[in-house]
Image (spheres, rainbow, N blue to C red):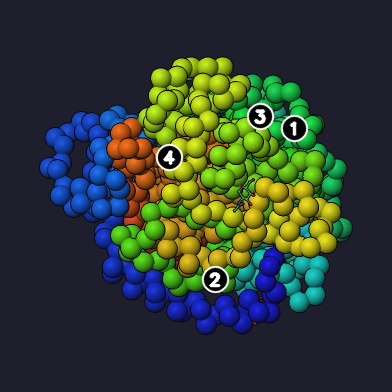
Amino acid sequence: MALVSAPALNSRFTSLVAAALCLIGVLWFFVPSFDAVKHLNVPGLHHPTPPPPPSTTSTTISSSAGNGLPPKPNHPIDHLIHQAHADFDTLLAKETHNVHDAAQAYRDRRGRQPPPHFDAWFAFAQNHSAVIVEDFFDQIYHDTAPFWGVPAQQIREQANGFLHRISVRGGNVTQRTDVEGGRVWMDLWADMVRSVAEFLPDVDLAINVMDESRIVVPWEEIDGYMQTERASRVIVPERELKTYYDGLTGLDRNPPSEAFDAEFSGMGPYWPLAVVGCPPGSAARKAYIETDFTTPPPLDGQFPAGSYEGYVQNWTLAKSPCDNAALQGLHGTFVEPISIANTKKFFPLFGGSKLPMNNEILLPPAMYWTEDPFYSGGKEHGRAWEGKKDGLIWRGAASGGRNKESNWRRFQRHRFVAMVNATSVELAGTGEQAPVNFALPGNNSYDLAALAGTSDSAADSSTSGDGSSSGSTTSSSYTTLANWIKSWSNAAVVHLLCFPEDPHPPYCSYTNPYFAVARAMPMAEQYAYKYLPDIDGNSFSGRYRAFLYSTSLPVKATIYQEWHDSRLAPWVHFVPMENGFADLYGVMEYFVGFGGGDGDGGVGGHDDVAKGIAMGGKGWAERVLRREDMQVYVFRLLLEYARLCDEERGVMGWREEPGG
Ligand SMILES: *[C@@H]1O[C@H](CO)[C@@H](O)[C@H](O)[C@H]1NC(C)=O
Ligand SMILES: *[C@@H]1O[C@H](CO)[C@@H](O)[C@H](O)[C@H]1NC(C)=O
Ligand SMILES: *[C@@H]1O[C@H](CO)[C@@H](O)[C@H](O)[C@H]1NC(C)=O
Ligand SMILES: *[C@@H]1O[C@H](CO)[C@@H](O)[C@H](O)[C@H]1NC(C)=O
Ligand SMILES: *[C@@H]1O[C@H](CO)[C@@H](O)[C@H](O)[C@H]1NC(C)=O
């Protein structure tokens, strides 16, 4: 789990906080303002309003970093980026600047009065220059709403009786766990809560100390709680409001007589346990449950569910295993997690990430609060875009779960690295080594120039075949594809993580033929490349925040939810990618282009667009993913949670009019 020891982390921690905060200030100065980057000039895109004048800057950048060829007109990604900006502008227009408007936005969106101390929360947020858009807090309501269907006393007692616990009493924070000297994530989360504790009512937080998310309550049970929640939603008149929290003195005088048993069980496999959290009509609930992971992965060449011509259009859907049943055989979380400790019991457990079918309450991950450069990337955010290598870099362990000789072909990191390995693609194309853990883009549904443009394959490569073989695309065009991949790809595993453990780690007898182990590369060095793919490991990827803060462009695939999801917009702040990676080559072609052979068949890239998203994401991260933003989130979350724990929660709220 934790790769750093607790004492080492703590000692480095405090001194780095100040340094990092200074640095954020300094960087802000050099980054173009958000407004300047949010309206991108996307070539080939139809502007509903008068098009901006042709930008000489973007033409220069394009040709200097690209190949000078014109890009494909009306590319689906042009449309997605355009739509994403329009949606994001609509969202930003909801920003509120005073507590009255913020409270009204709350009532409109939540159907309740804001919790007591809402004014203190707003003052804190405003004092810390937070961008206040009510929608940015949606995850809090997604996570906590079902608890309106559970008695307040039950919530209080379960949290109080849970072994791993952070408590706030009179503004003081304490913690309890089972390891002498503490656990590193617990220490970090306690520190996060402590940073706003002076404003908080008394609360107990049960904490998930594992990487994996752990609660899956059957969807039907949650639906019942949600019906209660909806029925209880009312804007209580101001004069009837109870405006304070009772606190937990009653609980402390009379604590639960025994520890709370969440009834975790380690029995797998995980997919059958997880699908019960999906809605009854969902793809996952209807799907056949796979048990044989020895075969190549089920990549059928179809455009992914809900995509726009194969590219991510609805990020929530693309990430959702409930909507993409094939993920049961394409992600280590379902194929074979490192550990399972699952329960169907609904109780308030706080953690850093979860699957859509999990029922935890999300905190900003402890990894994002630490200043350890292993996760944070340190103070270095990368050089200017123009000085970067025009390609993609990935280094990481072959994690994702317990990969074994029988099942590794289904793991996402293995798949990603093989797909951007020019040698493995070429060997697969010539038939010398069948692709054991990925599929070649058989009938070229993504219309890749590398598979269409050159030599003898031009005539038959566009035929829509059955996708079951490479029959419609010749081996020479796969060689062209491989050479193109080689021109921009640099990906390798740093440890093959064999199970059972190999006598010669980091190597691994059954995956050695397919992967070359490379040395680990600090994040700061990776920033020398323009494109940073981010692929889930055993749970969510802890480097994501650092990637967003960098001057490079994150290309993200995940099945996990995090606290920040509603404040980050795909195609505006990062590039979203399907978990099967079917869209990977299409995405890379859109950005880096394809030079073509003998001067024909090439297409231009969109280097300027890539730069715009990279810098837009960075500027936005510096506004809404700061430590202060995590504090603002935790402050709001715990006001809400404390209300849920109060016997009189139904009539509690912040009273706007002092005499009202
Ligand atoms: C906000 O800033 C003002 C002025 O510095 C200060 O008086 C107040 O206590 C601050 N409030 C919070 C909640 O931080
Ligand atoms: C909080 O901590 C301070 C300092 O240790 C102590 O004096 C105070 O009594 C504590 N308050 C509560 C409510 O525990
Ligand atoms: C996106 O997908 C989610 C999950 O399936 C769905 O609930 C939502 O309505 C979709 N959004 C749009 C705009 O279609
Ligand atoms: C490619 O093959 C898949 C699977 O047979 C099919 O669904 C898809 O429509 C084909 N695409 C094209 C462009 O022919
Ligand atoms: C690329 O694939 C080839 C063939 O499978 C393999 O020998 C090589 O080690 C791979 N390279 C990397 C960096 O994984």
- The residue positioned 66% from the left and 29% from the top of the image is 298
Q: Is mark 4 within 8 Å of ligand 4?
A: no
**How far is the residue under mark 3 from the one under mark 4?**
21 Å
Name the amino acid, label 4: Val
Name the amino acid, label 2: Pro
Q: Are marks 4 and 1 in contact (CB under 8 Å)?
A: no
Mark 1 or 2: the one toward you? 1
Q: Are marks 3 and 2 in contact (CB under 8 Å)?
A: no
Q: Position of residue 607 (x, y in %)?
A: 31, 48
**How far is the residue under mark 4 from the one under mark 1?**
27 Å
Q: Earlier in the sequence, mark 3 or mark 2?
A: 3
List the residue tagged with mark 2: 373
Q: Position of residue 138 (x, y in %)?
A: 49, 44
Q: Is residue 195 left or right of residue 339?
A: left
List the residue tagged with mark 4: 587
- Residue 295: give its label: 1
- Residue 576: give its label: none
What secondary structure is found at the residue carrying circle 2? helix
**How far is the residue under mark 4 from the one under mark 2?**
29 Å
- The residue positioned 73% from the left and 58% from the top of the image is 507
- The residue positioned 61% from the left and 82% from the top of the image is 11
What secondary structure is found at the residue carrying circle 3? loop
Mark 4 or 2: the one toward you? 4
The answer, for residue 255, to whether it is visible in the render is: no
What secondary structure is found at the residue carrying circle 4? helix
Mark 3 crowdedness (10 Å alpha carbons): few <14, some 14-19, many ≥20: some
Q: Earlier in the sequence, mark 3 or mark 4?
A: 3
List the residue tagged with mark 3: 298
